[in-house]
């Protein structure tokens, strides 16, 4: 049961019969994608984790409804969408205040010379800007930079062409670059 398309299709078929090892393989393969999708919509890490878990619970219970094993990613994305909508309705708000940045995930890999406070401020600011992007651009950023998916993996997950993934990431980078330049300009103007 490898990562090949036929291997994944075989894993789906085994999971449909209740094979626990196959179910675990499917969760391992799709967890990061589902989590990134939920995180791009729910902001709070705890909500995204809960929604990811609920997506797999619902998906594995309803796996027999999947019409085509090669469409598992898109099918899970649909379930994740409904779980996120349910979560948002429960909270009666689409987003928590961006002022509560202490609960946001942070990026890693910065110079050791930077102070921890400066690094955290920059990470928090960047995440605030990411969360201000349109949903499909924000999702692309999370899938590629936070979950390290390739363009092909993203295209399969999102159900779009590879060129669309490239276009969305390009737009997201440009919008973030402009937002960062604007915020830096505002920081130094009197």
Image (tube, grey):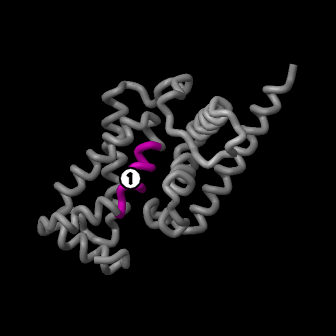
The image shows residue 97, relative to residue 134, as above or below, that is: above
Q: Quadrant of residue 119?
A: top right
Which residue occupies the foreground of this view, 123 or 189? Answer: 123
Residue at position x 31%, y 51% from top?
A: 79
Dot 1: few (<14), some (14–19), or many (≥20) neighbours within 10 Å? Answer: many
What kind of secondary structure does the magenta stretch mostly adopt? helix
Q: Position of residue 28 (x, y in %)?
A: 33, 61
* Total numbered labels placed on residues in the image: 1
- Location of the N terminus (image quadrant): bottom left
Q: Position of residue 14 (x, y in %)?
A: 18, 72
Q: Residue furthest left?
A: 17
Q: Which residues are magenta?
A: 29-39
Q: Secondary structure at mark 1?
A: helix
Which residue occupies the foreground of this view, 150 or 156? Answer: 150
> Is 89 a magenta residue?
no
Please state if 17 lies on the left or on the right of 168 as rendered: left
């Amino acid at each position: 049961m490898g990562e090949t398309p036929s291997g994944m299709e075989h894993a789906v078929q085994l999971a449909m019969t209740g094979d626990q090892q196959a179910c675990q393989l499917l969760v391992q393969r799709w967890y990061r994608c589902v989590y990134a999708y939920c995180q791009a919509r729910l902001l709070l890490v705890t909500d995204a984790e809960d929604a990811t878990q609920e997506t797999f619970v619902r998906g594995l219970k309803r796996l027999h409804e999947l019409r085509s094993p090669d469409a598992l990613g898109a099918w899970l994305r649909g379930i994740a969408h409904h779980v996120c909508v349910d979560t948002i309705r429960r909270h009666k708000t689409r987003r928590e205040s961006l002022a509560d940045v202490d609960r946001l995930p942070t990026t890693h890999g910065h110079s050791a010379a930077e102070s921890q406070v400066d690094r955290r401020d920059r990470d928090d600011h960047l995440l605030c800007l990411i969360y201000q992007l349109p949903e499909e651009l924000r999702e692309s950023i999370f899938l590629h930079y936070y979950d390290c998916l390739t363009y092909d993996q993203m295209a399969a997950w999102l159900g779009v062409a590879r060129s669309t993934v490239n276009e969305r990431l390009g737009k997201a980078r440009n919008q973030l670059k402009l937002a960062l330049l604007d915020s830096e300009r505002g920081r130094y103007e009197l």
